Amino acid sequence: MNVELRGRITRWRQADADRRAASAAANLDRQPAFPGRWVSAVSLIGGPVLIMAGTLLRSPFYYFVPYQLTAYTRHPALVTAAYVCFACGFVLLWPAIMTLAQRIAATHPLWGIWGGCLVIVGLFTRTFQFGTDHLAFHLTDTLGLRTMLTGIDGYYLAWRDTIWHPFRSMSGPAFFGWVVLAVGAYRSGALGLGRSIALGLMSALALGTLKGTEPQSFIAVGGLCVALVPLGVALLRGGPPPTRRAVIWVAVLICVHVLMTAYGPRG
């Protein structure tokens, strides 16, 4: 029995090694045509790190809605920074998902297409929810905590009774898309078993207005970091550094953005 079990484990390891080798061969010298190696690498590293930063910043406060609004009234800068990091992390994540989906599609096209599309649709759904968070915080400044607690209760009741809404119907991909992408990453050899499981753990991350850090949030976001950050580091190391012209243009665009933000029209 032990000999048979060892044989099965050996065959499973060999099959996993073969998948990884096939994926590496299919993606050899194949840099992301869009959005490019540097954008993809920054996304693979920065997206998970920002989401983890937001998770940590709001972890001192109980995750349920009333406690999130109460925390905002007492620590507005900290809570705002937490939600901004969380939202920016998910917005920044789309090139990372596109890059991973392209690596999967090199050997398993359907898994790459479906996994990538489902997760990106889920990212849009979470961005919609972050918009309601932002509005709720600013209305709390204007209307007061008690009024907003009543208003958020009414919003949740109305959302529950909504028969159809595009972002309500797309809540499923926000959860199950990660599982599809993780299975595709493993079957294609784009990620090993451990990192594929870590990626699938993102399906445990709560979705909804004013949902703070829950115990499983650290597991989900930690798995995302384990799955994607090493791939981003590998992309950075897998090619030449940016040219001086590219660095100059990036610096110019950043300066223009800062100036437009500081002195542009408001209202």
Image (spheres, rainbow, N blue to C red):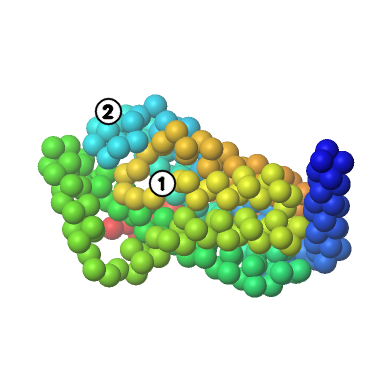
- Quadrant of the rendering where the N terminus is positioned: top right
Nearer to the camera, 21 or 79: 21
Quarter of the image for residue 158 reads: bottom left
Say left or right for 181 vs 70. right
Q: Is residue 107 above or below residue 52?
A: below
Question: SS class of the residue under badge 2?
Answer: helix
x, y percent for residue 57: 44, 32
Q: Which mark is residue 218?
A: none
Q: Is residue 142 visible?
A: no
Q: Is residue 232 above or below residue 125?
A: above
Question: SS class of the residue under badge 1?
Answer: loop
- The residue singled out by tag 2 in the image is 74
Say left or right for 136 vs 128. left
- The residue singled out by tag 1 in the image is 206
Q: Residue at x 20, y 47 (%)?
A: 152
Question: What whole-number distance in Å separates the C-alpha atoms at marks 1 and 2?
Answer: 24 Å
Q: Residue at x 53, y 48 (%)?
A: 202
Q: Residue at x 82, y 56 (%)?
A: 15
Say left or right for 57 vs 210. right
x, y percent for residue 45: 64, 46
